[in-house]
Amino acid sequence: MIDETAALPPTVYASSRPRAALHLAGAVAFVAVGAAMMASPSVVLVLVGALSVAFFGACAVGLTGRLVRRRPELVLDTAGLDHVQLGRISWSEIAEVRIRAVNTGSALTPHVVELVLHDPAGYLARAPRIARANARMGYSPSFSTSTLPVGHDAVADAMLRHRPELTVHNWGKRP
């Protein structure tokens, strides 16, 4: 029997420049609003403004990196996946994949791809700093598809092409 996945070339997703630019514009707008709030005589507005500047400023820095980066954001191959924020994770480490819709209260529903691992501690020992920080807040390794050139369904389909026995729960499917 021939293993069809052995001949399958990697699936490579670069950041979507238009999507990243749109997110960057939004982050810069929130930095500007936060800076304006910091000029207020109200202590509460100054604190909220400072938090907005700090948080969305960090987002803007990260999004600028995505715009200038030459490295793909996500690569799927027969051995596993490589994501810019999560690092390299082999398919054998992944117990299941969950596609989740994030409720933001808007008409645009972002999705995240959550990786449920067999040994989270083993992964975290070598994970990039951002993945370790997210784990301390109780999150499994996950990534958004909002800056990819394809949606969550296409990512899930590509994962299954590379690892057909992978369990994918797509709770983000529309009726």
Image: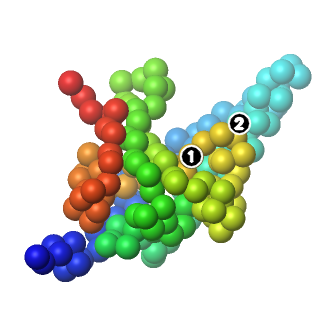
Question: Can residue 155 be seen from the camera position used here?
Answer: no
Residue 132: % across, % down: 68, 55
Dot 1 falls on a residue whose secondary structure is loop
Q: Is residue 85 above or below residue 153?
A: below
Picture quadrant of residue 79: bottom left
> What amino acid is at disc 1?
Ser
- Distance from disc 2 to disc 1, alpha carbons, whole Å, reads 25 Å
* In contact (CB < 8 Å): disc 2 and disc 1: no
* Picture residue at 26% right of the left edge, 46% below the top: 153
Residue 62: % across, % down: 59, 58
Q: Mark 1: few, some, or many residues within 10 Å (few <14, many ≥20)?
A: some
| Quarter of the image where the C terminus is located | top left
Residue 84: % across, % down: 52, 65
Picture quadrant of residue 172: top left
Residue 148: % across, % down: 37, 55
> What amino acid is at disc 2?
Ser
Q: Mark 2: few, some, or many residues within 10 Å (few <14, many ≥20)?
A: many
The residue to which callout 2 is attached is 52
Judge by depth and name the residue closer to the eye, 164 or 68. Answer: 164
* Picture residue at 12% right of the left edge, 78% below the top: 2
Comes first in the chain, label 2 or label 1: 2
The residue to which callout 1 is attached is 140
Judge by depth and name the residue closer to the eye, 45 or 97. Answer: 97
* Picture residue at 27% right of the left edge, 33% below the top: 173
Give the foreground label among 2 and 1: 1
Left or right for 52, reference 28: right
| Quarter of the image where the N terminus is located | bottom left
Dot 2 falls on a residue whose secondary structure is helix
* Picture residue at 51% right of the left edge, 53% below the top: 117
